[in-house]
Image (spheres, rainbow, N blue to C red):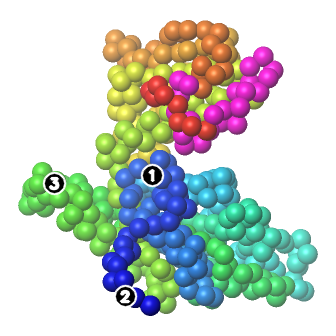
């Protein structure tokens, strides 16, 4: 056997991991580190190198509200199993008292209501979204800092041994699960780092940003603030069972502008897939996008404020146009902004367009609609990205 001495490249990933990364980057903006952590864990699992007897991955997401923590979990499920609702979401605000744990694991035999209490974390619940290709479960503990000590103690066994014992002594296996936990811990400290109000700190931040080091020193300070807040809140036993603590950065204008395009595409897909209205296409001018961005930019609430601005200014208006019969199936609607009126304006530029023409006018690369209904007949959407993006 000859000696090859061929240098290998450990940075390369497989096709499945690349597909996941591509899908996440289409849906999530400004959180590259978090995406990379999920891709690395998934690649390790595909290679059969995950730690035996533990969940596939235990991830703690920290950061301000509206930065994409929950959305990333949903996007992971959507990319892998095709359904964002495949995430088993546990709202930890509902488990602030020890006795409420019974809702998760069920009441022990002999307790009142034992037979009527169905545990939220049974094996059947975990496996319900498994497919022939992907047998993964996605479990999200949202706002974990609000949970009682009883829930944290319950998590210790899940994170370490991938096992949960229900009230009736049945065992639940989490070895095929990705465990996500989200928290807003450290959000105030991160905001103070980004927007200090007085003196030298303000000048230092401006100099760091002006020097183009916002992705370096500034991000390091934000990450340290989040991690230190987690250390003050959680016990060492809890943190030691977490594979990776990921700090989500607050979203800036550039990221919000990209999210705006994604959200407008989601509104278009909602129109295509709605059973209550005939499909039509809308386009948004640059000035209208600028208006939506101004209305939806709030550093405190992140992308959620942008989604509310889209609903308030665009979706509600389109709904009125549909209900009043001004917009019909096959129409092309142009959305503009009028400075004198200080609001969006709507114009019909075409009508009676065939379904295939409408599909070609929009981008269906993220999540193709199920079909366009025209004259009672369903027309299947192509799965390739269409030309003519807004």
| Residue drawn 51% across the image and 85% down it | 241
Residue in the foreground of this view, choosing between 181 and 365: 365
- The residue pinned by badge 1 equals 25
Looking at the rendered structure, the secondary structure element under dot 1 is helix
Residue 24 seen from this side? no
| Residue drawn 60% across the image and 19% down it | 357
First along the sequence among labels 2 and 3: 2
- Point out which mark residue 3 bears: 2
For disc 2, the neighbor class at 10 Å (few under 14, some 14 to 19, many from 20) is few
Residue 372 covered by magenta stretch: yes
Tell me which corner region of the image, top left, top right, bottom left or bottom right, holds residue 160. bottom right
Residue 363 seen from this side? yes
For disc 3, the neighbor class at 10 Å (few under 14, some 14 to 19, many from 20) is few
Q: CA separation, marks 2 and 3?
A: 46 Å
Residue 161 covered by magenta stretch: no
Range drawn in magenta: 360-382
Reply above or below: 160 against 126: below
Tell me which corner region of the image, top left, top right, bottom left or bottom right, holds residue 190. bottom left
Q: CA separation, marks 1 and 2?
A: 40 Å
* Principal secondary structure, stretch drawn in magenta: loop
Tell me which corner region of the image, top left, top right, bottom left or bottom right, holds residue 177. bottom right
Reply above or below: 108 against 351: below
- Point out which mark residue 212 bears: 3
Q: CA separation, marks 1 and 3?
A: 23 Å
Looking at the rendered structure, the secondary structure element under dot 2 is loop
Residue in the foreground of this view, choosing between 261 and 218: 261
């Amino acid at each position: 056997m000859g000696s090859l001495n061929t240098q290998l490249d450990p940075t390369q990933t497989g096709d499945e991991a690349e597909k996941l990364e591509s899908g996440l980057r289409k849906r999530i903006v400004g959180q590259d580190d978090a995406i990379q952590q999920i891709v690395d864990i998934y690649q390790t699992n595909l290679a059969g190198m995950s730690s035996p007897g533990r969940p596939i991955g235990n991830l703690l997401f920290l950061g301000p509200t509206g930065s994409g923590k929950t959305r990333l979990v949903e996007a992971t499920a959507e990319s892998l199993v095709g359904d964002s609702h495949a995430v088993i979401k546990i709202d930890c605000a509902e488990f602030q008292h020890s006795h409420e744990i019974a809702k998760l694991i069920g009441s022990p035999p002999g307790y009142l209501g034992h037979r009527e209490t169905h545990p939220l974390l049974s094996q059947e619940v975990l496996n319900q979204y498994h497919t022939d290709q992907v047998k993964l479960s996605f479990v999200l503990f949202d706002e974990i800092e609000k949970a009682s000590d009883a829930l944290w103690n319950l998590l210790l066994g899940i994170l370490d041994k991938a096992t949960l014992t229900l009230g009736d002594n049945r065992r639940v296996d989490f070895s095929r699960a990705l465990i996500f936990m989200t928290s807003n811990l450290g959000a105030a400290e991160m905001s103070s780092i980004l927007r200090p109000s007085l003196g030298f700190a303000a000048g230092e931040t401006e100099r760091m940003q002006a020097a183009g080091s916002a992705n370096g020193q500034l991000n390091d300070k934000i990450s340290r603030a989040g991690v230190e807040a987690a250390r003050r809140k959680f016990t060492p036993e809890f943190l030691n069972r977490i594979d990776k603590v990921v700090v989500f950065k607050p979203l800036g204008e550039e990221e919000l502008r990209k999210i705006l395009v994604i959200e407008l595409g989601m509104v278009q897909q909602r129109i295509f897939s709605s059973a209550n209205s005939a499909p039509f296409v809308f386009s948004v001018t640059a000035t209208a996008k600028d208006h939506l961005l101004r209305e939806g930019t709030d550093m405190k609430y992140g992308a959620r404020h942008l989604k509310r601005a889209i609903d308030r200014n665009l979706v509600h208006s389109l709904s009125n146009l549909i209900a009043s019969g001004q917009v019909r199936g096959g129409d092309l609607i142009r959305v503009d902004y009028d400075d004198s009126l200080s609001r969006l304006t709507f114009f019909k530029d075409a009508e009676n367009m065939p379904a295939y023409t409408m599909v070609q006018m929009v981008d269906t690369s993220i999540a193709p609609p199920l079909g366009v209904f025209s004259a009672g007949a369903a027309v299947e959407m192509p799965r390739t990205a269409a030309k003519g993006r807004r």
